Image (tube, helix red, strand yellow):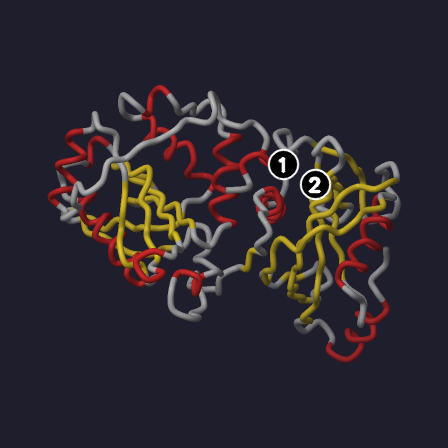
């Protein structure tokens, strides 16, 4: 499809200067759960169907138009899954543009996928666990859509900070960006960064989770697919935070922090800590204690009244560690296992 007329008219006035445009993109799935992708003619990369809205065009209608024009597929638009501003793009002719991207979840209704215009070299359906190489932004859009539970994801600002709102954890719905630094801790003469986990951290995170007698029986670094789906679900929920300790690019610790609303205790929020791990060669340095101090500070900042956790009864060293930090053994914990194995499909893990 040629450049829209309204953009050509704007270019006559502004030349190659930056244009602010609204784009739409679609994570289209069929009855088999496969994702519709196109291999773009301009760069040869696989990507989601996307396009530019015409002046006055409604986003959902514009996206339906783009999908049908590019692939011959007719879709229904189900949900808005993500809103973010992309970095400026400079085209080969010198034109500069920046896009507000509205990403939608859509479902195939009719039509066989095919190359339907000159924007694509190939069109095809792909299983979510067998996607071709593609730009990270397309993978991120897919992850967000697969993890969608009814709440639209909004990107953080350029500094990775969320926009303040009302008191309580709901004020941080935008959330820090994946990989954003949250704090810096001292470990002897070294500085270790606390930051949000990203997909490239998953092998190291899984190794940390597996590095004890209990974890070794339930974690599998050989298949990272369910962990990727899990991270996408965590990132899509503003009340979830999976962090790592980053020492110069080496992941030396991790934990998950969940912010829980409630009615009891005067409607107080609680912070739940799960999956606390510090690399075995870094234990005893005080790094784990400083990480838990950050947990308390972050939970207080988000309006929580209490930090709570559970730890297996066999982990006596962990019991002593938490008690030294001021945690009180005040409750008995019980768990009921509902599955014998981890779910294989992302749709099964998206809902809490």
Q: Which mark is residue 93?
A: none
Closer to the camera in the image, 15 or 229: 229
Answer with left or right where residue 288 lies relative to residue 67. Answer: left
Closer to the camera in the image, 301 or 87: 301
Answer with left or right where residue 9 lies relative to residue 147. Answer: right
Locate residue 243, reporting x and y percent. 36, 46
Mark 1: secondary structure = loop
In the rendered image of this protein, does residue 4 appear above or below residue 1?
A: below
Closer to the camera in the image, 27 or 151: 151
Q: Quarter of the image holding residue 136? A: top right
Residue indicated by mark 2: 46
Residue indicated by mark 1: 133
In the rendered image of this protein, does residue 286 appear above or below residue 24?
A: above
Locate residue 241, reporting x and y percent. 40, 49
Answer with left or right where residue 78 lies relative to residue 286. Answer: right
Do the residues bearing badges 2 and 1 touch, measured as CB atoms within 8 Å? yes
Locate residue 84, reporting x and y percent. 59, 60
In the rendered image of this protein, does residue 279 appear above or below residue 9?
A: above
Q: Residue sitting at 67 percent across and 73 percent down? A: 17
Locate residue 306, reporting x and y percent. 26, 54
Number of numbered discs visible in the structure rendering:
2
Q: Residue sitting at 39 percent across and 45 percent down? A: 242
- Label 1 CA crowd tier, 10 Å (few <14, some 14–19, many 20+): few
Closer to the camera in the image, 152 or 287: 152
Name the quadrant of the N terminus. bottom right
Answer with left or right where residue 238 lies relative to residue 322. Answer: right
């Amino acid at each position: 499809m040629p450049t829209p007329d309204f953009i050509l008219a704007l270019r006559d006035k502004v030349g190659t200067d930056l244009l602010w445009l609204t784009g739409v993109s679609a994570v289209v799935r069929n009855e088999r759960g496969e994702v519709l992708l196109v291999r773009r003619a301009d760069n040869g990369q696989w990507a989601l169907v996307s396009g530019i809205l015409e002046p006055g065009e409604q986003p959902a209608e514009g996206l339906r138009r783009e999908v049908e024009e590019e692939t011959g597929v007719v879709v229904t638009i189900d949900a808005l899954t993500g809103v973010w501003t992309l970095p400026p793009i400079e085209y080969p002719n010198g034109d500069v543009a920046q896009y507000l991207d509205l990403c939608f979840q859509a479902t195939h209704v009719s039509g066989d996928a095919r190359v339907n215009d000159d924007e694509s070299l190939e069109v095809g359906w792909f299983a979510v666990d067998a996607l071709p190489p593609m730009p990270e932004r397309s993978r991120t859009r897919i992850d967000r859509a697969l993890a969608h539970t009814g709440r639209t994801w909004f990107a953080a600002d350029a500094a990775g900070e969320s926009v303040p709102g009302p008191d309580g954890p709901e004020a941080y719905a935008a959330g820090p960006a994946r990989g954003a630094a949250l704090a810096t801790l001292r470990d002897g003469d070294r500085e270790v960064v606390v930051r949000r986990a990203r997909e490239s951290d998953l092998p190291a995170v899984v190794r940390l989770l597996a590095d004890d007698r209990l974890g070794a029986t339930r974690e599998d670094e050989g298949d990272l697919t369910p962990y990727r789906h899990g991270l996408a679900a965590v990132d899509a929920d503003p009340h979830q935070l999976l962090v790592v300790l980053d020492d110069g690019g080496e992941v030396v610790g991790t934990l998950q922090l969940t912010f829980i609303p409630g009615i009891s205790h005067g409607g107080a929020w609680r912070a739940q800590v799960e999956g606390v791990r510090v690399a075995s060669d870094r234990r005893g340095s005080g790094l784990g204690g400083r990480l838990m101090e950050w947990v308390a500070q972050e939970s207080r900042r988000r309006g929580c009244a209490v930090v709570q956790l559970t730890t297996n009864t066999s982990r006596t060293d962990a019991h002593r560690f938490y008690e030294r930090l001021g945690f009180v053994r005040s409750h008995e914990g019980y768990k009921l296992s509902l599955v014998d194995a981890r779910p294989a499909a992302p749709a099964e893990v998206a809902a809490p």
